[in-house]
Image (spheres, grey):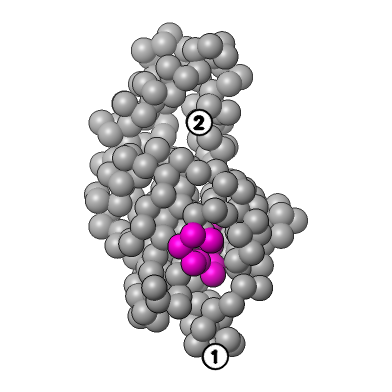
Amino acid sequence: MPDLVIGFDLDLTLIDTAPGFRDVLVALGTELGVEFPVDELVTRLGPPLDLLLAPYLPAEAIPAAGDRFRALYPEHAIASVPVLPGAHDAIAAVRRHGGRVVVVTGKYAPNAQLHLDHTGLDVDVLEGWVWGVGKAEVLRREGASVYVGDHVHDVEGARAAGVTSVSVLTGGSTADELRAAGTDVVLAGLEEFPAWLDAHLAARGGGVTAP
């Protein structure tokens, strides 16, 4: 295994899932006869779907609604979802240093894989349906030394794994919220990641260690 392994979140870190999420939620609401506050929910992307749906559906209806959301997802949310600026370059930067790329996401893994295939994002490992501190186990297993995400719960996963937390401001968490959660680095977006990685590795003599 190479010395350098970098973990990335997927939604709102590597790809802009907001358009697809909106379209799936509209389709789900139409089927269920529920008018979800779509624009509000799109701004709250990050937590597991069940938590987002909980205020609007009876508890007993949520598992089936989640299953239906995931079934509707490929039709409504793949073609419309682009990579975020700098995503391909960020992965290429890891490759230039001989590293591996691990995507650790709360998204249902088969749908996450559809995004990777559609966008051509070149990753070595995809782990889906892990959230918050649950991401730490995957990061440790893969030998990651950095985890890049957009949400305070991504920071929690990095902190629990004992790896460097890099946060981008392309999701729903502010710089102040991310710093309060304990992130090590805040970047405006992935466009800034290659230069950061070069400097990070240079400061450690070409290798990466936990903070």
In this view, the mark in front (2 or 1)? 1
The residue indicated by pointer 2 is: 49
Q: Secondary structure at mark 1?
A: loop
Up-down relation of residue 91 to residue 103 (above or below): below
The residue indicated by pointer 1 is: 205
Tell me which residue sits at (43%, 17%) in the image.
64
Tell me which residue sits at (31%, 26%) in the image.
72
Q: Which residues are magenta?
A: 140-151
Q: Amino acid at mark 1?
A: Gly
Label 2 to label 1: alpha-carbon separation: 42 Å
Tell me which residue sits at (37%, 42%) in the image.
109
Q: Amino acid at mark 2?
A: Leu
Across and down, in percent, residue 114 comes to: 28, 44
Residue 155 seen: no
Specify the quadrant of the image occupied by residue 53: top right
Q: Secondary structure at mark 2?
A: helix
Quadrant that contains the N terminus: bottom left
Which residue sits furthest bottom? 205
Up-down relation of residue 108 to residue 138 (above or below): above
For this view, does 186 lie left or right of residue 176?
left
